[in-house]
């Protein structure tokens, strides 16, 4: 076969197969001129305004940011809570044993007299908090603990907690798991044993009371029943 024929066949084969495949792109395209990347850390700088809920994925402007109680625990909070509890119960056991004169006296339930210096349960935990939600409108589910248990009264202040009976049956949750709620217009709460959604402007502080100290606050905008079966 002549060289001229070989070249002709090669040209026909190339035409029938099209252009050779391009190599895959392994580098990103260049940044368009004038484009700027978003700085999601800017709101954490000293003096910067609070972040708006719309900065979170899926939350539209004006909507409340859904949060859960675990979001309010800073790093190490659970370990510190466990340490304080273990320390307290070890001290209590030592006191029982030191005062026991019989097997009955050694029983904690038989040894504690109502109103005695041992008839109390401290609030464990700390006031360490998470800064992320300061000034934001948030929405969180939980249970109401009024300061006054008259169901006919309109409540302008109450505590909000993560589980039923908290603060009523001691010990209360740690301060960073209690929210002090302020309701300017007041709300009527008929049943404290059902869960609610609390929505409003979030804050931090030291809110001290005999029921349970709180490290967080919410200025109430909305109180709604939780869709509980």
Image (cartoon, rainbow, N blue to C red):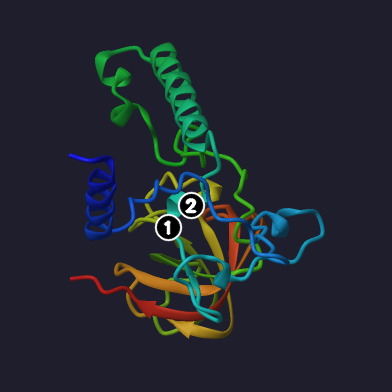
Instruction: Mark 1 and mark 2 in contact? Answer it, CB < 8 Å.
Output: yes
Mark 2: secondary structure: helix
User: Looking at the picture, how far across and down is residue 31, in whole percent?
Assistant: 63, 58
Q: Which mark is residue 217?
A: none
Residue indicated by mark 1: 68
Q: Is residue 127 left or right of residue 17?
A: right
* Quarter of the figure with residue 46: bottom right
Q: Is residue 172 left or right of residue 206?
A: left
Q: Which residue is nearer to you in this view: 126 or 157?
A: 126
Q: Which residue is nearer to you in this view: 86 or 13?
A: 13
For disc 2, the neighbor class at 10 Å (few under 14, some 14 to 19, many from 20) is few
- Assign the N terminus to one quadrant of the image: top left
Q: Is residue 194 above or below residue 213?
A: below
Please report the residue visible at 29 percent of the width from the left and 13 percent of the height from the top.
102
Q: Is residue 35 left or right of residue 55?
A: right
Please report the residue visible at 38 percent of the width from the left and 31 percent of the height from the top.
112
Residue indicated by mark 2: 71
Mark 1: secondary structure: loop
Q: Is residue 222 above or below residue 32?
A: below
Q: Is residue 93 above or below residue 11?
A: above
């Amino acid at each position: 076969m002549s060289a001229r024929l070989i070249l002709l066949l090669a040209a026909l084969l190339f035409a029938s197969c099209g252009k050779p495949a391009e190599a895959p792109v392994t580098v990103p395209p260049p940044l368009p001129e004038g484009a700027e990347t978003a700085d999601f850390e800017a709101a954490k700088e000293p003096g910067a305004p609070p972040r708006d809920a719309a900065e979170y994925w899926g939350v539209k402007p004006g909507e409340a940011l859904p949060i859960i109680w675990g979001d309010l625990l800073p790093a190490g909070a659970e370990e510190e809570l466990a340490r304080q509890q273990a320390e307290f119960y070890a001290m209590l056991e030592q006191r029982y044993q030191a005062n026991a004169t019989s097997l009955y006296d050694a029983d904690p339930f038989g040894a504690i007299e109502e109103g005695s210096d041992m008839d109390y349960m401290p609030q464990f935990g700390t006031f360490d908090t998470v800064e992320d939600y300061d000034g934001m409108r948030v929405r969180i589910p939980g249970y109401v603990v009024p300061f006054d248990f008259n169901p006919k009264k309109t409540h302008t202040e109450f505590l909000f907690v993560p589980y039923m009976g908290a603060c009523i049956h001691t010990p209360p949750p740690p301060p960073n798991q209690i929210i002090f709620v302020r309701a300017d217009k007041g709300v009527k709460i008929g049943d404290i044993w059902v869960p609610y959604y609390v929505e409003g402007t979030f804050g931090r502080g030291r809110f001290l009371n005999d029921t349970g100290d709180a490290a967080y606050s919410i200025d109430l905008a909305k109180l709604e029943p939780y869709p509980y079966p």
